[in-house]
Image (cartoon, helix red, strand yellow):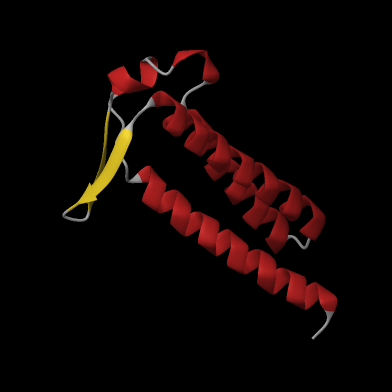
Amino acid sequence: MTIELKFAIVVTAAMTALLILGMSVAAVPVPVTAQASLGNGGDPISFLESAKMHLRQATKDLKMGNSQAALAQLNMTHQGIISAERQLNASGFTCNNVSNEGYCVAP
């Protein structure tokens, strides 16, 4: 296999994993009142929406054969997910999965 093909396979696998993670994270409802009380650090939902947008752009870039741009978009996707996770951790939310339904409880 050529290096380009190996890279495309790795990027596709990474994008698939991030997409699955994004869908599972998007399934966690966060009350609107809790979103507003997160302070000046930003809203985790906006970070996840940004990550989703970058993941879609990475897919487009990969389909067009622009692997460098796709990798840059994947890095921005990762940063968005990490930022949302930090916001949720810093806010004191307790998130659980009961009966296959995710939910978060404000402190």
Residue at 41 percent of width and 25 percent of height: 91
Residue sitting at the far left: 99
Image x and y of residue 102, in percent: 26, 46
Image x and y of residue 47, in percent: 53, 33
Image x and y of residue 81, in percent: 54, 42
The reply, left or right, for residue 5 in relation to residue 50 is: right
Residue at 52 percent of width and 13 percent of height: 40
> Hey, which quadrant is residue 10 in on the image?
bottom right
The reply, left or right, for residue 86 in relation to residue 28 is: right
Residue 105 visible in the picture: yes
Residue 45 visible in the picture: no
Q: Is residue 29 above or below residue 62?
A: above
Image x and y of residue 37, in percent: 37, 15
- Quadrant of the rendering where the N terminus is positioned: bottom right
> Hey, which quadrant is residue 67 in on the image?
bottom right
Residue sitting at the far bottom: 1
Q: Is residue 96 above or below residue 30?
A: below
- Of residues 68 and 94, the one drawn nearer to the viewer in this rendering: 94
Residue at 28 percent of width and 23 percent of height: 107
Residue at 28 percent of width and 25 percent of height: 106
